[in-house]
Image (cartoon, helix red, strand yellow):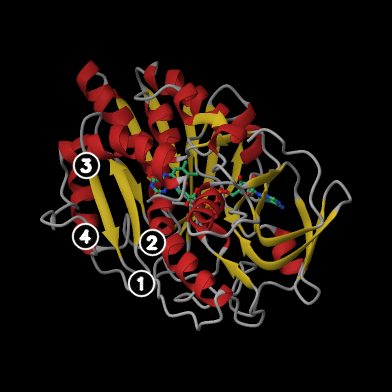
Amino acid sequence: MDDHTGAPSHARVAVIGGGNGGLSIAGRLRRRGVTDVVVIEPQAEHCYKPLLSHVAGGTARASETVRRQADVTPRGVRWVQDAVAHVDPERRRLELGSGASLGYDHLVVAAGIRQDWDAVPGLAAAMLSPAGASNYLLDLAAKASPLLRDVRGGTVVFIQPPGPASCAGAGQKPMYQACAYWKRSGVLAGIRVVLLVPDATIFGIPEIDAELERKVAEYGIEVHTGARVEEIDAERRTVVFTTRTATAAPRAHSVTYDVLMAEPPQSAPPFLAESGLSGPDAEGFVDVDPRTLRHRRYDTVWALGDAAATTNSKSGGALRKQTAVLAANLLAVLEGRAPHAEYDGYGVCPFTVSRTSAVFAEFDDHGRLAPSIPFWRRSYRESRLAWIIDRHVFPHIYWHLILQGRA
Ligand SMILES: Cc1cc2nc3c(=O)[nH]c(=O)nc-3n(C[C@H](O)[C@H](O)[C@H](O)COP(=O)(O)OP(=O)(O)OC[C@H]3O[C@@H](n4cnc5c(N)ncnc54)[C@H](O)[C@@H]3O)c2cc1C
């Protein structure tokens, strides 16, 4: 629908954010008969973020990742092009950036996660310099592709930050793709590839760690675990970082790079805590029951996706399960019944480990493998099938089914 100017005064269900989670839940509710669903989303274009890793790694075009918000908003759902500045959960009202306000019966918060490019001194400047890029923003992903392609020697550093993150391991994906390209071009042996990861192992689940470590050994990647970047000097192209283990004192290091690929530190959008929607252990995210996705204190507030203080690893794959649960529970409440559906903490990170293969890492919030596709229990092993699903099947499912609330 194209009329997205001006907010109505009231919505049966208001949804903050028209990204992956917001459009999926809006579409599901609309399809299940809720007629007055309003999505508040400031951006005119919608990005399919998993494909950004392929853009940076040189296996997708930037144009494939973006569609007009008006074209992806589910039919029958009203899109208001605005940003929510404040939520008053007691009075059930939203204040919008334009100055308008909107009342609601129920609110679904799907505002995503914030990218904190200024959290590390020098990171933003490094991204503006010719040697810096990332797969976490479209323009930086487009910049990364030729930058990585043209490396013939020197040092390339990949950074994955500590703290909450949207698909935390995604920062590693262009690295494996670039290594496969350099290997095929015969230049890999002359390139020092350095990966900084925040945790004690490369991913955190033994079976997946083993699969990724096999690729790390194949490509000769130098991995620093327990790493935290302290500072980047964009002019001298130097990353200063510390490594920590449970037993030893922190150690300081520095590495000079020819190309830097960084995943930004991430945190909750500040307006959530400012509106009283967070809680003592929620780190600024919306304080929902991680099983029902209903707010712990406000019965008419729900949240899902990257903005929710759930226990899972934040990902689009997790959202597929969350939207089904939230829709069932919200519909039950609208019909006067108790919410009964429970989200099981499922998450997924498809690691592209070459230019033709991927590791389909599916797991629960206890760090156990949780394969979701029948008869494919070893989806965490490197395969061509996982690549085809990630690169070619998922984008179609996303644009045509997930965003419409059909999957
Ligand atoms: C580089 C990258 C690669 C990824 N790869 C994968 C992958 O391979 N597999 C996978 O499953 N997941 C992957 N993910 C994670 C996945 O994209 C996210 O988990 C998912 O998009 C989260 O959906 P969301 O609706 O919570 O947030 P988003 O999709 O980020 O949407 C949030 C929306 O809220 C809007 N918003 C923010 N503030 C306000 C406000 N104040 N008012 C109104 N609207 C607001 C934003 O503009 C945005 O459109 C990746 C993420 C990134 C960044």
Q: Position of residue 329 (x, y in %)?
A: 49, 73
Seen from the viewer's position, the closer of residues 140 and 66 is 66
**Tag count:** 4
Q: Earlier in the sequence, mark 3 or mark 1?
A: 1
Q: Characterize the local packing of mark 3: few (<14), some (14-19) or many (20 or more) Cα atoms within 10 angstroms.
A: many
> At which x and y percent is residue 89?
75, 73
Going from N to C along the chain, the mark reached first, 3 or 4, is 4
Residue at the spot of label 1 = 344
Closer to the N terminus: mark 1 or mark 2?
A: 2
Residue flagged by tag 1: what amino acid is it? Asp
Left or right of residue 68: residue 58: left
> Which dot, 3 or 1, sits closer to the camera?
1
Q: Amino acid at mark 3?
A: Ala
Name which residue type carries label 2.
Lys
Which of 177/255 is in front? 177
Graded by Cα atoms within 10 Å as few (under 14), some (14 to 19) or many (20 or more), the crowding at tag 1 reads some
Q: Can residue 353 be seen here?
A: no
Which label's residue is closer to the chain start, 4 or 2? Answer: 2
Q: Identify the residue at image location x=54%, y=69%.
A: 309
Q: Which mark is residue 321?
A: 2
The local secondary structure at tag 2 comes to helix
The picture places residue 316, in percent across and down from the top left corner, at 43, 51
Q: Which residue lies under the disc numbered 3?
A: 386
Circles 2 and 3, Cβ within 8 Å, touching? The answer is: no
SS for dot 1: loop
Is residue 95 visible in the rendered image? The answer is yes
Foreground residue among 104 and 157: 104
Q: Is residue 193 left or right of residue 159?
A: left
State how far apart marks 1 and 4 are (Cα): 13 Å
Q: CA distance from mark 2 to mark 3?
A: 19 Å
